[in-house]
Image (cartoon, rainbow, N blue to C red):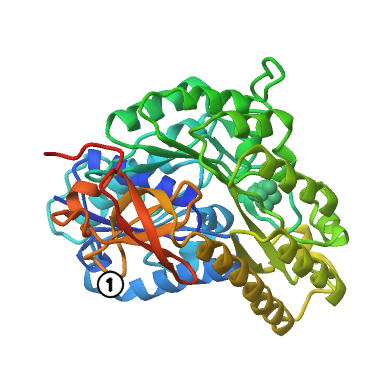
Amino acid sequence: MPKFFIKTYGCQMNERDSEQVAHSLLARGYERVGHESEADVVLLNTCSVRDMADQKALGKMGMLGRLAKERPHVVFGFLGCMAQARGGSLLKDLPHVDLVIGTQKFHRVADYVDELAATKEARTECAPYHSNRAMDDVRFSIVDVDEEAGSQSTIRDQQLTPKQATAFVSIMQGCNMHCTFCIVPQTRGAERSRSIGEIVTEVRDLVSRGVKEVTLLGQIVNLYGRHEFPKVDNKSPFVQLLESVHKVEGLERLRFTSPHPIGFRHDLIDAISRLPNLAEHVHLPLQSGSNKILKAMHRAYTVEKYLDLVERIRRARNGVAITTDVIVGFPGETDDDYRRTRDLVEEVQFDNAFVFRYSPRRDTPAAEMPDQIDEHVKEERNQDLLEVVNKSNRRILERLVGSQVEVLCEGPSKTNHARLMGRTRTNKIVVFPPSSKRRPKGKSEELVGELVNVRIERANGFSLYGMPLLEYRYSIAS
Ligand code: SF4
């Protein structure tokens, strides 16, 4: 049985795309392995959002050149955003690469891998060449980064692990917003959405297989369907979708990411207040606390509008957690602009924030802007802002000590396999043992995939630690 290894860089959309590719290879009889040295097919699903992500994937593939010499039958491929942006040029610098597949072609990977594996098998004389094709027709490498109509509907299957409690569902692809720093409109193309019916069918299937929490994914998820589907009763297609998915019986929690602030109109705020299974967590990318920089970023909102939105979301749902993304060191960002960002982050008291140093991306307007910021200034602002974020994060976690929270148990903790981990409705990580004084004979397997009530005993900077209570909500195997 041929074996494949797939490594994913970047965001949750990439994770989801990799799962689709894995599913298609498993369906062909390939076996998934955890290390490239055991694999007959090595795929890197890449990210292009920052230069560092590009460099990581290029460096990894460069190191795999040695493996290619030792095991010439292995098929090596780049998938995803960097593959889309760089195309066939990747073959020039890394001659052992056989496959370059863009973001609209994940569903073709299995066919291409089969074809290349057969060609390599023949060339390395491991087995008689079984194709009748003339050698002229044989492709030794494949590059496919074309657009394909309907490709947004091809990310729809996934293999679940036993007792998998959470799943991502891709609802749209692409983005038309053209923020001046962002390469995504180039790598993912224009906005294209799946139909509500297709998405609900996928969610229903996942829930029937044991999934309790679904996260709807899109580059600007809350602007879903705006070009394809009409408003109904003054509700946007995204709110219509939330309502439809919310009705799926057995679905306990519904999340969405990543939204754009301009997509939070009255109907969505209203949905947050009235759909109980919508989890109490909103990721609300800020990017900058300076109106001048927001304008240069082409973000289409002001600091005042952002703050008003935070207020309205907090009023709509008690205890809602708000997280964000911030870019520091955007071209032209003065000390005063940075101070405005810092003040705003302090004022809002985010539950968490991802802070990024601005990274110029090829063919984006911001890369050509004057007044690019020195790397060491970016780094100073990055470290300074992280301190502010960590303080508010710690404060919020400490407030939860002594309370009881509902945790969806995902499996063993990554750092200590004797313990379990899961997330609260507000997306906080909780680590807990499988047994406690009140539950002395608890076994780990019983709680995986279940909603568990946990009493929080302590917090560190990033996670909560607690004890499971008896009255977890689902009856476990007796
Ligand atoms: S909204 Fe802006 S930052 Fe987000 S994917 Fe689109 S262009 Fe990029």
Residue underneath mark 1: 67
In front of the other: 412 or 104: 412
Asked which secondary structure carries label 1, the reply is helix
Instruction: Choose top left, top right, bottom left or bottom right for residue 253.
Output: top left
Q: Judge left or right: residue 401 versus residue 373.
A: left
In front of the other: 143 or 330: 330
Q: Amino acid at mark 1?
A: Leu
Which residue is most to the top?
233
Percent x, y for residue 476?
19, 40
Q: Judge left or right: residue 332 versus residue 12.
A: right
> Is residue 397 shown above or below 378?
above
Residue 138 in view (yes/no): no
In front of the other: 276 or 104: 276
In front of the other: 82 or 315: 315
Q: Residue at x 78, y 77 (%)?
A: 373
Figure disc tally: 1
- Could you classify mark 1 by the number of other residues whose Cα lies within 10 Å: few (under 14), some (14-19), or many (20 or more)? some
Percent x, y for residue 331?
80, 69
Q: Is mark 1 within 8 Å of ligand 1?
A: no
> Is residue 103 shown above or below 345?
above
Q: Quadrant of the C terminus?
A: top left
> Is residue 101 shown above or below 376?
above
> Is residue 319 shown above or below 416?
above
Which residue is most to the bottom?
376
Q: Residue at x 67, y 53 (%)?
A: 285
Residue 469 in view (yes/no): yes
Q: Judge left or right: residue 175 versus residue 196.
A: right
Percent x, y for residue 89?
53, 62
Q: Residue at x 64, y 67 (%)?
A: 356
Percent x, y for residue 134?
28, 43
